Image (cartoon, grey):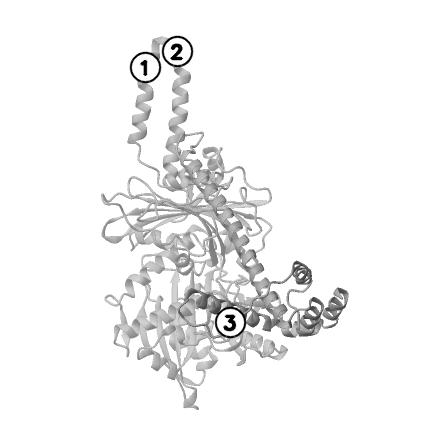
């Protein structure tokens, strides 16, 4: 009979799957009946509605139902009928027995699980208490202090180590000299201890060692007495951490000496004032035990320059230590950057002692010049005289990586605070690069130090600080139709975004927002980008095309021609048959070429094509830029009435002009671009053009050809117009030559 029942169960397997969800309701029904029975038993005064009869199952019946329960805890109707017939029970009795059995088993399982989990919790709690007690008693075997770096500053650890070493040295000398100088040794030890107490605490505390998506975070605040306190941190173990700390400590010492010492370590470039070049022989004699010899197959580039900047040292350190600000201020040099780790958050209240691991890509504004990538540590320290030093040093020897294409020896700057909010900044760039790298037309420009040297870094910083000081609402110099300070700040902010967008596509950087496609020739670089629901950019498929060419005309004349509104109709197809007028002019620097212009273009044949052109031009000792973007009249007028500049769609284009063969002489007072040799200027032209108004649109070969033809047409117009005899008296002294070549 048991075989028959099991056989029916197997044959009715599909029925079991359908009825299984209803078993929970049967269990609930059994529980309700049991609860009702308990209530009736608890209240004897309540009259019983009906006398209930209870029958006990025999041991044989219970045993057979137990065996069947092991095979099938949820029998269906047919199986219950067969089982009740075999056991001579009512089907409802079999049904209720299985319901009660399932409830009993479920309660037993839950009780066992709770007991097991409670036991595990007790074991973990006991293990945690043992670990906490062990951490409280742990000490550093070298210095005797706490074993966790998070419980004391980096300097305190160094002082403890030094104190332990001196103590051992004193004990050794005491043993050698014997009883005659025992008291002297004892007093020496006392002096060492008191010397430790008088020593100022170092400003580095080892911080959390892991991936940090943001920068340093909230770092400002002091204790009640006004002195700075190290920020308590948790430290993950890393055997190479101390190697990085020792590396940046040595780099800081070297950079400080390089910033202070003069001849014979440094000598003027071409015996002129201004930028200084490092004497490599003297360098390796002075720092023979530093960072090792020069890498095989690499050449060294080292330069030093200094300038007085209108900004105090605290604000300058904030620019240099915040990776976002640093990338924006030096957006013409830094194409992209990232902070990977913060090894030390320094002291609370400023950036003193901050140590972080970074990577960055550096560019020259031309697709012909390969970028340089570096993986390095950046360390900041304030000296007792109030000056600040920031140093970068490569970590390739400690952490080999696939990022670096150049080696940064100790590079950075020394900032000395002057009166009235000014600071003197001495900048040092010292890198080693592969000597086989080709820079094409820009070989002389890069080798002169203007491409990646200290002069270019300082020029960008100086120009940025001037821009901030002059474009403040209180001191803004302007003329035009816009009178409100909010509208002017709107124009300044919009121009800043336009400049950053242009510089991401003018060099050879492979930024994430662009995808490189095959160009028609090696001297042209074409990239594509799709935009959809992206504020500030039109939706669709955008092409970025850039190239560089040589023009045997001085850079100052080319820059004047490209930025001046009266020459615009000679090269810009948007202004060929239009009335062009500068409606707003905002100065951004002391040089007349540093300004933001809002140009109104009224088409003579079709008024529906009227537009504004936003242009920013700026120049310094290492190069000049003229960047512009056409903007529709409607969105610009709405934005000037209180809109957000981040939501104005624009595609910037423009030019970057650098001297071909710089002559290393100090620029005249008020001037910006240094004198150049007879070969003139190197010009990079870049356009961003919307070729399809749908992001999913395909890029056809005809679109690429049309954009390339437009590039060639614009270049030809510039070459012919800037060398035209009718423009000579407007552009300055006589032009050297009319010929121009494109690589």
Q: Are marks 3 and 2 in contact (CB under 8 Å)?
A: no
Q: Label 3, on which residue?
A: 51
Decide which of 501, 549 is in the foreground and name it: 501
Residue 279 visible within the image: no
Q: Vertical placement of 56 versus 274: above or below?
A: below
Q: Label 1, on which residue?
A: 184
Circle 1: is it few (<14), some (14-19), or many (20+) Cα within 10 Å? Answer: some
Question: Who's the residue at 44% across and 67% down the image?
Answer: 39
| First in sequence: mark 3 vs mark 2 | 3
Q: Vertical placement of 125 versus 75: above or below?
A: above
Q: Quadrant of residue 389?
A: top left
Q: Label 2, on which residue?
A: 177
Horizontal side of 328 relative to 102 (left or right) equals left
Q: Vertical placement of 719 versus 63: above or below?
A: below
Tell me the element at label 1.
helix
Q: Quadrant of the image for the C terminus? A: bottom right
Residue 484 visible within the image: yes
Circle 3: is it few (<14), some (14-19), or many (20+) Cα within 10 Å? Answer: few
Question: Who's the residue at 28% across and 73% down the image?
Answer: 486
Circle 3 or circle 2, nearest the eye: 3
Q: Vertical placement of 613 versus 398: above or below?
A: below
Horizontal side of 432 relative to 602 (left or right) equals right
The Cα atoms of the two marked residues, 2 and 1, are separated by: 10 Å
Q: Do the residues labelled 2 and 1 touch (CB within 8 Å)?
A: yes
User: Which mark is drawn over residue 122?
Assistant: none
| First in sequence: mark 2 vs mark 1 | 2
């Amino acid at each position: 009979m048991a075989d028959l029942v099991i056989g029916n169960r197997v044959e009715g397997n599909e029925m079991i799957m359908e009825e299984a969800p209803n078993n929970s309701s049967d269990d609930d029904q059994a529980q309700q009946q049991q609860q009702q029975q308990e209530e009736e038993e608890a209240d004897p005064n309540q009259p019983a509605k009906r006398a209930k009869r209870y029958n006990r199952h025999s041991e044989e019946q219970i045993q057979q139902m137990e065996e069947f329960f092991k095979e099938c805890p949820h029998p269906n109707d047919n199986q219950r009928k067969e089982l009740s017939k075999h056991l001579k029970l009512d089907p409802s009795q079999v049904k209720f027995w299985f319901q009660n059995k399932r409830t009993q088993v479920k309660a037993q399982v839950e009780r066992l699980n709770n007991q097991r989990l409670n036991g595990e919790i007790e074991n973990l709690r006991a293990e945690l208490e043992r670990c906490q007690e062990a951490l409280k008693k742990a000490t550093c075997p070298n210095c005797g202090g706490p074993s966790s770096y998070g419980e004391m500053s980096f300097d305190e650890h160094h002082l403890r180590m030094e104190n332990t070493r001196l103590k051992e040295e004193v004990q050794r000398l005491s043993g050698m000299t014997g009883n005659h100088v025992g008291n002297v040794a004892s007093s020496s030890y006392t002096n060492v201890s008191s010397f430790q107490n008088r020593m100022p605490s170092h400003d580095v505390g080892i911080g959390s060692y892991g991936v940090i998506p943001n920068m340093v975070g909230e770092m400002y605040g002091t204790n009640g007495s006004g002195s700075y306190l190290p920020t308590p941190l948790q430290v993950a173990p890393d055997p190479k951490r101390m190697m990085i700390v020792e590396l940046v400590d040595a780099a800081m010492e070297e950079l400080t000496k390089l910033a202070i010492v003069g001849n014979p370590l440094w000598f003027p470039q071409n015996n002129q004032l201004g930028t200084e070049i490092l004497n490599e022989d003297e360098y390796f004699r002075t720092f023979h035990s530093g960072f090792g010899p020069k890498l095989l197959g690499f050449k060294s580039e080292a330069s030093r320059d200094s300038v007085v900047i209108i900004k105090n040292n605290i604000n300058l350190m904030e620019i240099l230590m915040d990776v976002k600000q640093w990338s924006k201020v030096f957006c013409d040099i830094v194409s992209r950057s990232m902070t990977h780790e913060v090894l030390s958050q320094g002291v609370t209240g400023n950036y003193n002692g901050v140590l972080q691991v970074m990577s960055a890509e550096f560019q020259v504004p031309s697709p012909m010049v390969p970028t340089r990538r570096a993986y390095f540590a950046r360390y900041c320290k304030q000296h007792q005289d109030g000056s600040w030093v920031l140093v970068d040093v490569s970590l390739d020897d400690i952490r080999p990586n696939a990022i670096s294409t150049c080696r940064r020896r100790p590079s950075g700057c020394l900032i000395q605070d002057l009166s009235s909010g000014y600071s003197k900044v001495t900048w040092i760039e010292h890198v080693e690069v592969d000597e086989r790298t080709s820079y094409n037309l820009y070989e002389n420009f890069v080798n002169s130090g203007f491409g990646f040297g200290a002069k270019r870094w300082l020029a960008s910083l100086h120009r940025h600080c001037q821009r901030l000081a002059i474009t403040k609402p209180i001191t803004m110099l302007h003329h035009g139709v816009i009178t409100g300070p909010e509208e002017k700040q709107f124009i300044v902010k919009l121009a800043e975004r336009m400049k950053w967008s242009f510089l991401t596509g003018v060099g050879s950087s492979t930024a994430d927002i662009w995808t490189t496609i095959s160009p028609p020739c090696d001297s042209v670089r074409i990239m594509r980008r799709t935009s959809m629901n992206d504020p500030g950019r039109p939706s669709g498929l955008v092409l970025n095309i850039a190239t560089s060419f040589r023009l045997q005309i001085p850079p100052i004349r080319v820059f004047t021609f490209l930025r001046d509104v009266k020459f615009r109709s000679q090269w810009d197809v948007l202004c060929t048959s239009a009335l062009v007028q500068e409606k707003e002019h905002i100065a951004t620097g002391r040089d007349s070429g540093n300004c933001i212009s809002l140009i109104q273009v009224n088409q003579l044949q079709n008024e529906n094509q009227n537009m504004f052109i936003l242009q920013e031009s700026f120049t310094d000792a290492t190069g000049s830029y003229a960047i512009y973007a056409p903007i529709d009249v409607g969105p610009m007028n709405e934005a000037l009435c209180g809109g957000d500049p981040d939501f104005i769609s624009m595609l910037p284009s423009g030019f970057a002009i650098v001297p071909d063969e710089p002559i290393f002489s100090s620029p005249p007072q008020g001037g910006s671009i240094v004198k150049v040799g007879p070969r003139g200027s190197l010009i990079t032209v870049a356009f961003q053009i919307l070729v399809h108004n749908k992001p999913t649109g395909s890029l056809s070969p005809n679109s690429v050809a049309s954009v390339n033809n437009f590039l060639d047409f614009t270049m030809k117009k510039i070459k012919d117009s800037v060398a035209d005899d009718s423009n000579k008296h407007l552009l300055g002294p006589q032009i050297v030559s009319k010929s121009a070549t494109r690589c």
